[in-house]
Amino acid sequence: MSRIGRLHVITDVHLQRRFSHLELAKAALEGGADVVQLRDKEASARELLEIALEILPLCRRKQAALIINDRADLAWAADAHGAHLGADDLPLPLARRFLGPDRIVGSSADNAAEIALRAREGADYVGIGPVFATTSKRDAGPVLGIEALSVLARSSPAPLIAIGGIGLDNLEEVLATGVNGVALLGAVCLSPDPESVVRKARAILESRS
């Protein structure tokens, strides 16, 4: 596994109630995800920490990474592999100082200027999107589309992980832009068979490697 991987799966228990974070993480790892991103904006710090501590041994067993969204402090407390930070979270340079050089620190961006800034600040990867329309993130920026994503991928100084409305039906199109990888959320969490979706996405990724 490379440091940041190519297939990220974001767990979500508010878009759906069928699966827990742990169940989604298990499905993602069995399907071949490189990274599990634990995201829950409503859970308490204690709840998130307990969930992270359940998921982390599964990730280590599969040689995958656990990244905690928004909470560099919980990534440190759980001894997770890293954190993904948004605009309202701990500033990236401070998170890097806090987490150290060996943990993954990712961040989000909407455009080329933000990608360049995140790269200068030391992000290991930049989440770029939404590529397509999505209902899984209420504060998502304007839709980029494939053409704009291709332009950003060609010029980006940091590895890009594309996100937003990505599923099995458009995954190849997204990968053809040259992004480093993708993050899947709704396509996995809303499926009655999350593991199957991740497994099929892994096969598509492998066919293009």
Image (tube, helix red, strand yellow):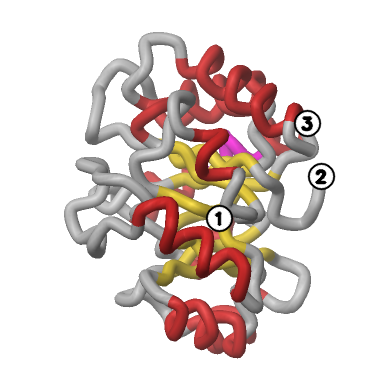
Quadrant placement of the C terminus: top right
Residues at marks 2 and 3 touching, judged by CB atoms closer than 8 Å: no
The residue carrying pointer 2 sits among few (fewer than 14), some (14 to 19) or many (20 or more) residues within 10 Å by Cα, namely few
Q: Quadrant of residue 6?
A: top right
Question: Where is mark 1, residue-wise?
Answer: 161
Q: Which residues are magenta?
A: 51-56
The residue type indicated by label 2 comes to Met
Q: Which mark is residue 61?
A: 3
Element under disc 1: strand
Quadrant placement of the N terminus: top right
Nearer to the camera, 83 or 80 = 83
Q: Residue 67 vs residue 86: left or right?
A: right
Q: Main secondary structure of the magenta part?
A: helix
Q: CA distance from mark 1 to mark 2?
A: 15 Å
Q: Which mark is residue 1?
A: 2
Q: Quadrant of residue 176?
A: top right
The residue carrying pointer 1 sits among few (fewer than 14), some (14 to 19) or many (20 or more) residues within 10 Å by Cα, namely many
Residues at marks 3 and 1 touching, judged by CB atoms closer than 8 Å: no
Nearer to the camera, 180 or 64 = 180
The earlier-in-sequence mark between 3 and 1 is 3
